[in-house]
Amino acid sequence: MKSVVILASGNGSNFEAIVRKIRSNNWPIEVRALITDNPGAYVLIRAQRLKIPYEVLDFKSFPNKVAYNTMLFERLKANTPDLIILAGYMRILPDFIVEHFRNKIINIHPALLPAFPGVRAIERAYEAGCKVTGITIHYVDERVDSGPIIEQVCTKVRKGESLESLEKRIHRLEHKFYPLVIKKLLLGD
Ligand code: GAR
């Protein structure tokens, strides 16, 4: 049995897609914990509903970033994950966490990196008039939305398509491919 920890800060649709896919396929992967920095995140409701253990490290309750990240490091180590999965985790991991878990932390980004790193990537690709965009799953390194690319899936922006439609399709791609990449990394093909 492999084990993972998922880090998320917001809605948590990727978190839910991963948990559901693991369960429906009976993959030998245990989601040991969901960790969030945001006590108001909807992902917590999903974790409760799915009965996944969760830990809230309320960023605002720590005196500073170092104190927060030190606690996060402790919690990650305590869960001894084979893989740490960022799924809409909106903070930058400090170098000491990246270094300790080198090639054991992955992230998903809703654009074709290295294009459009950072926030609002779908919107920025749309506003730039991209004809093609997509998703990237990559190992995490010391920089933002950077690190060796594991998988990319692209999609054409349809003629006259609304931003809402594109967002929906990008999220659908994320929900389909993130679980598959996780399975491949942990269990092989
Ligand atoms: C996802 O689209 C993910 O790719 C993006 O945040 C969203 C989280 O959605 N991540 C980034 O932009 C990382 N730079 P979710 O909370 O519903 O899974």
Image (tube, helix red, strand yellow):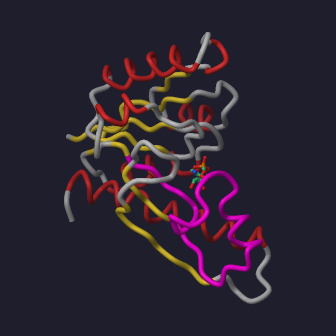
Residue 12 located left or right of residue 24: right
Q: Residue at x 31, y 20 (%)?
A: 78
Residue 159 located left or right of residue 121: right
Please state the total of marks drawn on the protein image. Answer: 0
Figure quadrant of the C terminus: bottom left
Q: Is residue 112 magenta?
A: yes
- Up the image or down, 164 lies above or below 68; here it is below
* Rendering coords of residue 167 (x, y %): 69, 66
Figure quadrant of the N terminus: top left
Among the 4 quarters of the image, the one containing residue 53? top left
* Rendering coords of residue 85 (x, y %): 41, 43
Specify the farthest residue to the top. 63
Among the 4 quarters of the image, the one containing residue 82? top left
Front residue of 43/73: it is 73
Among the 4 quarters of the image, the one containing residue 60? top right
Front residue of 180/46: it is 180
Q: Residue at x 28, y 51 (%)?
A: 27
- Up the image or down, 99 lies above or below 184; here it is above
Q: Residue at x 60, y 68 (%)?
A: 170
Q: Residue at x 45, y 16 (%)?
A: 71
* Rendering coords of residue 63 (x, y %): 61, 10
Front residue of 22/183: it is 183
**Magenta segment range?**
106-135
* Rendering coords of residue 67 (x, y %): 51, 14
Residue 114 located left or right of residue 43: left
Specify the farthest residue to the bottom. 159
Q: Is residue 181 magenta?
A: no
